[in-house]
Image: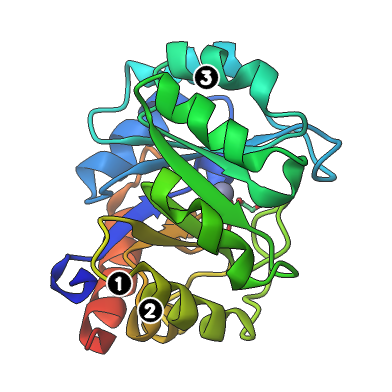
């Protein structure tokens, strides 16, 4: 069962120094990050812009753990090969990004990468049911995607619980993205979360010159989550 799996912490580099991604990634990995979460935004599916495949490719060589690429873009399908070639380990697409999410997940799997499905806060968990067997990960958005530093939406905790039950024994990770802090991490961990994405709560107070706060922040989130696991 998923409860036996350790919690993974995936810092989002959306909260890192954009002029220094290489050293920021080295800093979070040396401070205990399990994965590196990369937020790709297109100014269309979400009201913010970040970066595309060339930057993801450039930072790939700095990642020694797992590169978890969260695509907040529409359309998705024309870009899947480029993000796969850029070195993503996991490629997550949004259910809401177009009418053919089933095809999108098939295409991600077709590249040999792990496939993730993200659900916006306004999307019912039941929408994921016909797609689960194409997923290695389901990401429950606990904020509306587009920006770091937003407030956790508590109504999503029930969605996490339902998703965890729907998944059962299948090897599918439940990821939480948005507003994760030492206060909210236990709520989702108790509901069945496996991977916690955290941007502002990991990067606050630290820097590449002073990375120890990153480690303290990661340990605080992990400790609170693991204590709440059933
Ligand atoms: C939001 C992004 C998140 C974001 C989380 O659209 O998908 O990954 O960086 O940031 P925090 O942890 O600050 O809410
Ligand atoms: Zn994200």
* Residue at 30%, 81% in the rendered image: 224
Asked which secondary structure carries label 2, the reply is helix
> Which residue, given by chain and number where applicable, does mark 1 sit on?
168
Task: Give the label, 1 or 3, closer to the camera.
Answer: 1
Q: Position of residue 12 (x, y in %)?
A: 49, 47
Task: Give the label, 3 or 2, closer to the camera.
Answer: 2
| Quadrant for the C terminus in the image | bottom left
Ligand 1 falls in which quarter?
Answer: bottom right
> Which residue, given by chain and number where applicable, does mark 2 sit on?
165
Front residue of this view, candidates 99 and 23: 99
N-term mark: 1 or 3: 3
> Which residue, given by chain and number where applicable, does mark 3 sit on?
83
Report, in whole angstroms, how far the alpha carbon at label 3 lies from the one at label 2: 31 Å
Mark 2 Cα shell of 10 Å, populated few (<14), some (14-19), many (≥20)? few
* Residue at 70%, 55% in the rendered image: 145
In the rendered view, does 42 fall on the left or right side of 65?
A: right
Report, in whole angstroms, how far the alpha carbon at label 1 lies from the one at label 3: 30 Å
| Badge 2 vs badge 1, beta-carbon distance below 8 Å | yes
Asked which secondary structure carries label 3, the reply is helix
Cβ at disc 1 under 8 Å from ligand 2: no
Front residue of this view, candidates 70 and 2: 2
Asked which secondary structure carries label 1, the reply is loop
Front residue of this view, candidates 204 and 158: 158
| Quadrant for the N terminus in the image | bottom left
Mark 3 Cα shell of 10 Å, populated few (<14), some (14-19), many (≥20)? many
- Residue 121 vertical position relative to residue 88 in the rendered view, above or below: below
| Badge 3 vs badge 2, beta-carbon distance below 8 Å | no
Report, in whole angstroms, how far the alpha carbon at label 2 lies from the one at label 1: 5 Å
Quadrant for residue 22, please give it.
Answer: top left
């Amino acid at each position: 069962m998923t409860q036996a799996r350790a919690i993974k912490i995936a810092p989002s580099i959306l909260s890192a120094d954009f002029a220094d991604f290489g050293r920021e990634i080295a800093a979070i990995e040396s401070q205990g990050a399990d994965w590196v979460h990369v937020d790709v935004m297109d100014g269309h599916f979400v009201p913010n812009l970040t970066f595309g495949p060339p930057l993801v490719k450039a930072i790939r060589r700095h990642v020694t753990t797992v590169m978890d690429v969260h695509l907040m873009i529409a359309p998705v399908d024309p870009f899947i090969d480029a993000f796969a070639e850029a070195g993503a380990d996991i490629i997550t697409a949004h259910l809401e990004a177009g009418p053919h999410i089933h095809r999108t997940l098939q295409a991600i799997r077709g590249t040999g990468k792990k496939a993730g499905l993200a659900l916006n806060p306004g999307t019912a968990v039941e929408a994921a049911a016909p797609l689960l067997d194409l997923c290695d990960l389901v990401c429950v958005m606990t904020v509306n995607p587009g920006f770091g530093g937003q407030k956790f939406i508590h109504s999503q905790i029930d969605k996490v619980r339902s998703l965890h039950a729907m998944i059962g024994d299948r090897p599918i990770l439940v990821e939480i993205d948005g507003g994760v802090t030492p206060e909210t991490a236990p709520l989702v961990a108790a509901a069945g979360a496996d991977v916690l994405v955290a941007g502002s709560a990991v990067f606050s107070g630290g820097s590449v010159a002073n990375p120890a706060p990153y480690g303290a922040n990661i340990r605080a989130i992990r400790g609170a989550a693991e204590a709440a696991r059933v």
